[in-house]
Image: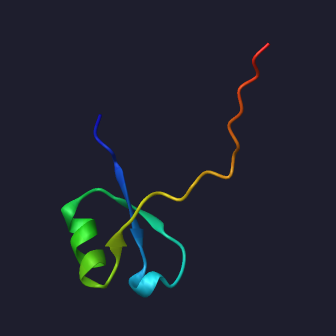
């Protein structure tokens, strides 16, 4: 399965990461402007299993 988005962190990590469309014509200008690839933000949902 191919990802359709790539997460990029703003220059100098000043601000929140943002999802960009995974296409060269979108990513190259952003990366030239200082954005860098990063992990997606952690989900705020807690996953728990109920065993019983």
Say if 52 sits above or below 33 in the image: above
Give the residue drawn at x 68%, y 52%: 44
Task: Return the x and y of residue 5 as percentages of the image width and height.
Answer: 37, 53
Give the residue drawn at x 53%, y 59%: 41
Residue lying farthest right? 52
Say if 47 sits above or below 19 in the image: above
Task: Return the x and y of residue 21 as percentages of the image width and height.
Answer: 34, 58
Report the front residue among 22 and 36.
36
Q: Is 13 left or right of 26, judged from the image as shown?
A: right
Report the front residue among 17 and 46.
46
Based on the displayed image, in which of its 4 quarters is residue 33 positioned?
bottom left
Give the residue drawn at x 70%, y 43%: 46
Report the front residue among 8 and 23.
8
Task: Return the x and y of residue 30 as percentages of the image width and height.
Answer: 30, 76
Based on the displayed image, in which of its 4 quarters is residue 3 positioned?
top left
Say if 34 sits above or below 7 in the image: below
Q: Is 33 left or right of 28, judged from the image as shown?
A: right
């Amino acid at each position: 399965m191919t990802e359709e988005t790539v997460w990029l962190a703003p220059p100098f990590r000043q601000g929140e990461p943002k999802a960009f469309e995974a296409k060269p014509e979108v990513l190259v200008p952003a990366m030239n402007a200082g954005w860098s690839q990063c992990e997606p933000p952690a989900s705020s949902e807690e996953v728990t299993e109920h065993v019983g």
